[in-house]
Image: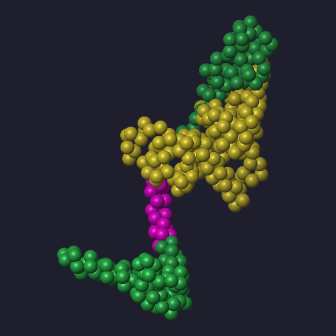
Amino acid sequence: MIEPSLGTLDERELARRATLGQEAAFAEIVRRHQGPVYRFCLRYLSPADAEDSAQETFVRAFTHRHRIDPDRPLLPWLLTVARHLSIDRLRRRESSGANDLIDDPDAHADTRAGDALGSAMTGQRAEILRQGLASLPEGQREAVMLFHVEGLAYKDIATTLEVPVGTVMTWLHRARARLKKLVESAEKTPE
Amino acid sequence: MSHLGDERLIELGLDLTAVPSAVEGAHLADCPTCSRALATERALTRSLAIELPRAEPPRDFVAATSARFAATRRALEPRRTLARLALALVASLVVAVPSVWVIALHAGDMTRHFAIGAKEITVLASAASVVADKIPLVPVLFAGLTATLLLGASIGLGQLAEASRRPIAVAVRA
């Protein structure tokens, strides 16, 4: 059971308590960051695997809590762990031939990305954005999702994806230019 | 001023709360090209923020993860206990083995050191007995403690005396 006061704690204090091994603090961290971590795993994996990978991310964070730096935001670190776990899982699956992602992982990643974005997107613009996003290279797509959906800052995206901040900015700008072009050309072309 | 650069337009377009500078604002008011470009950037930002749906984790995600914490903790506990025991054992061996080795190697020296030290400690022992006499309530305890201290000190002083090659008690008296 989460003690009521934990929900009001700032992240730094929460992280400090987590480093001391307080399970309630960890449960609160899970509650706060479950969405972004799950969605990030979903970028690579099926929903069932993404759920398992996201849970494993928090368990790893719990067992390696001494690595938590209360002075830094937790989410980028969690997303980095999630990314490594998801990619490892994907590779294991590919090498064991357990799924059909061997031939063209990117193409399937695009399909998964499309699935992850969900069927709830309606309207022409939403559909164009969904397709445009799915067609972007991996880095650009990640940058767009982390910036626009999860609201991460450039430097936190850089930490998560383990690339320089300049690369994140380039990816984001290129992705936006491409998406803007797609939307504009679609709006100019009557159906 | 000239048109706003692409980088600046994106910068202003990414942050919907960003306010252009006074000069930029004046330009945007007069330049349909720049104002349209900025409007497009901001519309894209709004679309991406609003229209991309957020897949949510299952409702029992927190509970399931907490259960995994507990299971992980239970699984790790015996390993930690074993690790602590192993560490204690290693630490004991690190202390005990060299000690036994030193004692075995220098048993003769230690006996000699004890004899030298015992001789040198006579003065201190006399003083201790005087103090013990003046504390009648705890003479036995005090004597036992003194004997223990004297035993340890005699070996140590003997080593020091031999190392310095002069009688310590004489030096103290002098």
Observer able to see residue A130? yes
Query: What residue occupies the far left of the structure in this picture?
Result: B137
Tell me which residue sits at (48%, 73%) in the image.
B88
**A127 left or right, relative to A63:** right
How far across and down, in percent of the image, does residue B52 sit?
62, 31
Tell me which residue sits at (77%, 22%) in the image.
B6
Which chain corresponds to the colour yellow? A
Q: Main secondary structure of the magenta part?
A: helix
Quadrant (top left/top right/bottom left/bottom right) for the C terminus of chain A? top right
How far across and down, in percent of the image, does residue B28 sit?
72, 11
Residue A159 lies in the magenta-colored region: no
Q: Which of A187 and A81 is in front in this view?
A: A81
The span picked out in magenta is B66-85
**A130 left or right, relative to B167:** right
Which chain corresponds to the colour green? B
Q: Which of B103 and A133 is in front in this view?
A: B103
Tell me which residue sits at (66%, 37%) in the image.
A155
Residue B78 lies in the magenta-colored region: yes
**B140 left or right, relative to B19:** left
| Vertical relation: A40 (above or below) B94 | above
Tell me which residue sits at (50%, 45%) in the image.
A15
Q: How many labels does the image show?
A: 0
How far across and down, in percent of the image, does residue B64 sit?
47, 50
